[in-house]
Image (cartoon, helix red, strand yellow):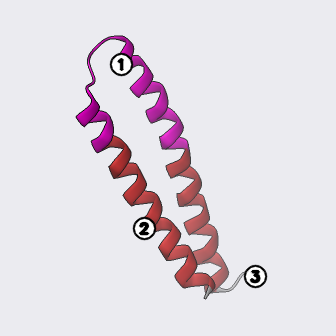
Amino acid sequence: MLDHHTIELIRNIEGLRLRLNALDVAATGITEGIRNNTLNADSVYQLLDLLACDLKTRADKLMALIL
């Protein structure tokens, strides 16, 4: 049986994997948006900034659990 600490690590790693998948999907959406002229540089920046902040938060949680 896994202890609480290990379970939290696994949950956070899975959350990180989901965020990375979202980044992959976002890249596809950004490419399509640029091709269709429906996205501008500000929109792309806002999306990437949001994803980066979320990934940093997940990484910080993982570091806190590990240390």
Point out the frontmost of discs 1 and 2. 1
Marks 3/1: CA–CA distance: 49 Å
User: Which span is picked out in magenta?
Assistant: 21-46
Earlier along the polypeptide chain: callout 3 or callout 1? 3
Residue 57 is tagged as: 2
- Closest to the camera, between mark 3 and mark 1, is 1
Q: Residue 27's x, y, as percent?
A: 47, 32
Mark 1 neighbour class, 10 Å CA radius: few under 14, some 14 to 19, many 20 or more: few
Name the element at disc 3.
loop
Please tell me whether the stretch drawn in magenta is mainly helix, strand or loop.
helix
Classify 10 Å Cα crowding around label 3: few (below 14), some (14-19), many (20 and above).
few
Q: Is residue 13 above or below residue 2?
A: above
Comparing 39 with 11, the one in front is 39
The residue that mark 1 highlights is: 34
Residue 21 sits above or below residue 28 on the image: below
Q: Which quadrant of the figure has residue 33?
A: top left
Q: Is residue 5 left or right of residue 18?
A: right
